[in-house]
Image (tube, rainbow, N blue to C red):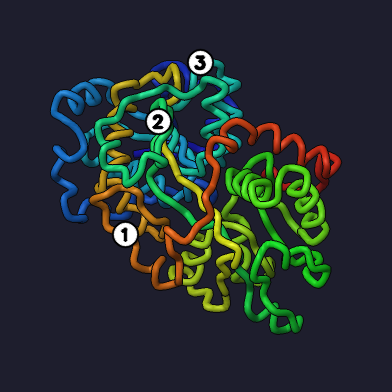
Amino acid sequence: MRNVSRREFLGTSAIAAAGLGLTACGGSSSNQSSSGTDTSSSGGSDDLSRIASEDVIEAAKKDGELVVYGSCEEQHVAACAQHFQELFGIETSYQRLSTGEVESKVEEENGNPSADVWFGGTTDPYNVAVTKGILEPYEAKNSSHLISDKFHDADGNWYGIYKGILGFFYNKDELERKGLDAPQDWPDLLDEKYKDLIWMSNYNTAGTAKLILNTVIQKYGHDEGIKYLVNLDKNVQVYTKSGSGPSKNVGTGECTIGIGFLHDAIYQIVDNGYNNIGLVIPSSGASYEVGATAIFKGCKHENAAKLWIEYALSPQCVERAQEVGAYQFLVIDDAKQPAVAEEYGLDPNNVMDYNFDDAKENTEQYVADIMNALGGGDDRFQTE
């Protein structure tokens, strides 16, 4: 398995030619491969019949390779790409990009995508991609293992693999030093005492920010929701490019309060040892993402892409996540859930009734609305 550098993927069109001649990453710190991790020891990983029939597997092997755009965390997509290659002998390359980057890039490629499949990241940008016709519908056999119909697109454009809880996290030491209590619900974040203390992600680049946007509009209505976010902007210090950006900076104290997925903060506590991080599940009800996977329309390795979808809807794939510190709840009926998420008080059923149809139809317009209300944004909005 090879991880391809951001420059190679974004700066040239060569990967679309000559059988996708991809170059290994070398020492890029932003694209570090997880290829040293043994991911083949999980129970049932050798039982390929749970994933696909021999005919499907053999057809995929004839394609010979697969290119994955991953919008979950780097180590997560790396572990799954490596494991797929180990199981099937299909050369698998991946690139970690935010959901907004993926949607924009594949749209620009206009039916000639430089990757075959999309893996991870919240479904709001996937639904934008559906409206633009850049995903390929596929009737996955393993969709029968999804715990609810809400975890797949009605036309098979995408399938859910995990469920992440949206909330707040904070640096305990910094709040104590400032003599402040932690916010407990969305209205609390508007208090002027939190001015320049809050980090969230960029509406233009991060699926997490799009989920925050949709959540607030669904809670308060369009006009009041946009007004809320304009008021929240007065307290925001940084808008990170990636949805996990705030969580990566809260333990160090650079970020005092972050809005994002609580499983990302749990990773910082459990795996990186930042015991000074506190978690908040909003008292009026948490929102949630469905992390997804999909095939790009016009992909060059269609049979390998179909096998990837079946693999992604199996315990062999989704259980890789918790082995590398990704603690989202899984939506596959025979997969082992990450116990650590429940230990930190997260409950996959204690969430608001998120309107995915509204998000599918209106996310792009809502992004335009909030950015217009914010005057187009300023230098707090990170894109690199």
Amino acid under disc 2: Val
Residue 67's label in the rendered image is: 2
Label 2 environment density (alpha carbons within 10 Å; few <14, some 14–19, many ≥20): many
Q: Left of 194 or right of it: where is 17?
A: left
Q: CA distance from mark 2 to mark 1?
A: 28 Å
The residue drawn where x is 68% and y is 39% is 204
x and y percent of residue 56 in the render?
20, 25
SS label for mark 3: loop
Q: Nearer the viewer, residue 95 or 11?
A: 95
Q: Left of 182 or right of it: where is 295?
A: left
Amino acid under disc 3: Gly
SS label for mark 1: loop
Q: Nearer the viewer, residue 6 or 216?
A: 216
- Among the two numbered marks 2 and 1 on one chain, the one whose residue lies closer to the N terminus: 2
SS label for mark 2: strand
The residue drawn where x is 64% and y is 33% is 362
Q: CA distance from mark 3 to mark 1?
A: 37 Å
Residue 337's label in the rendered image is: 1
- Reading the image, the residue beneath label 3 is 111
x and y percent of residue 200 in the render?
67, 55
Q: Residue furthest right?
A: 375
